[in-house]
Amino acid sequence: MKFSIKLVLSTMIVLALALGFSGFYFVNYVFETSLDREVGQALDESSILSFAFETAALNVPLKYSVLPDSVVEEIASKLEMGGQGDGRLLRIADEEKNILYTSNGFTADEGLLPQTDQHTKSYRVIRAQDRFYVHTCVAINALNRILYLETMKDVTEVFTERSLGFSLYRKVTLVMLLTGMVIMLFIASLLTKPIRLLTRATREMAAGDYRYRARQISRDELGQLTGDFNRMANALEENISKLEEEIEAREEFMGAFAHELKTPLTAIIGYADMLRSHKLDEEKSIMSANYIYTEGKRLEAMSFRLLDIIVAKQDEAQLMETPVGELFSYLREMFAEKKETDIRFSCEEAMVWMEANLIKTVLVNLIDNACKASEVGSTDGADRDVVGSDMAGVVEVSGKAVDGGYRIAVRDYGIGIPETEQNKIVKAFYMVDKSRARSKNGAGLGLALCAEILKIHHSELRIESKVGEGSCFSFVLAPHSNL
């Protein structure tokens, strides 16, 4: 059952109960008020009749010391005739409560007489022959006699009005319920429209349309729910996009990995087969063994780099406050023997939060790449004229305190990187110049490893490069308070 139907039915049930109880109370209140009024009038009329009877008894001739039964009947008959137009009904009983006179149509039983004495009045509401009456009984003191006067007042109209009131109220209630149902259906449709929009959005997203959003048409709780749903959908779409990108990157990685394995393995297998199946002279044997050794070392380096990337992705860096001077001293010693490239170090002394060994790995990779890009013959003379021959073969490694942390940069004046390639070089196995990279035993994993290490330092690798002018790779290590 739809929520809107449930809402309408629930409202109608509550409304029906409210109207039913209130109608019953109202009609009954009017009925009881009218009946109390009629009872009061019946008692007043009974008192008037008793007074009239006593007055008439006083006019009886003095020859009677005690009021005879015949006179009682005569007085009663006159009292009945005096109210003939009002349908007056009465009955008179003697001291022993034996009936002396009864009007035609007086059908009440004698059940009220035993409840009445000289000092009380009594009454009851009775039903006789499909009509309702107020039956009263009162004692009369007339000429040394105690008589009992009973009357019956027709109050059928009061009961008829109650029946008509209930009938009318039922009709009014039915009309109000039907009208209320139509109005509530309209209101429920408006109130549940955000739910229908959310349901449609959910179905569209379940069908694969992650760009679909629910339209927000109110600012109440349902409107807030719609806004939260759309924000959740945005986050879900972003996560799905990231997953798709990761899957695509993983497929590219596996394809590149298979290709990078295939090339050295083909060379190794080919030269090993040549050594196995042919008798070669010493020069060719040495050349074949050298190819096997070189490609094997390349596979070894690639496997180590892959392992480092996997560890970097899964590990959490144990950051410690480390002097930058110690880091640069290590780099000077490590590259001191590299005579073919002029590596210049400069740094401002500072204490930086980092995992020293991981940052060393980053800088070693960046400096090694800069040295390869700056080697003589890596670019032609036309490109060299852009930056001047005095900077050829120079690599600058600098450290400087900046707003928000400490910036370390590695700059070379080599071949540079095309702008279209700069966003791709941090991907595993990606190489701008594959033939040149392989000639240096490269596999395109160094910058990917650097990017992963900087991620766990809450930093990123920034690349500035122009073809023929060189490149600058830099990153900022945040202070401890910002980590």
Image: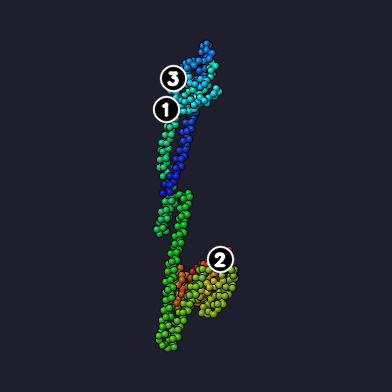
Q: Secondary structure at mark 2?
A: loop
Circle nearer the viewer, 3 or 2: 3
Res. 241 mark: none
Spatial separation of the CA atoms under disc 3 and disc 2: 114 Å
**Which residue position holds label 3?**
84
Q: Amino acid at mark 2?
A: Ala
First in sequence, mark 2 or 1: give its number: 1
Q: Three-letter amino acid code at disc 3?
A: Gln
Q: In the figure, is residue 360 to the left or right of 468? A: right
Q: Which residue is mark 2?
A: 478
* Residue 359 image-quadrant placement: bottom right
Q: Which residue is mark 1?
A: 129
Q: Secondary structure at mark 3?
A: helix
| Residue pictured at 40% horizontal, 59% vertical | 208
Work out which quarter of the rendered image holds the C terminus and state it: bottom right
Where is 401 relative to 267, above or below?
above
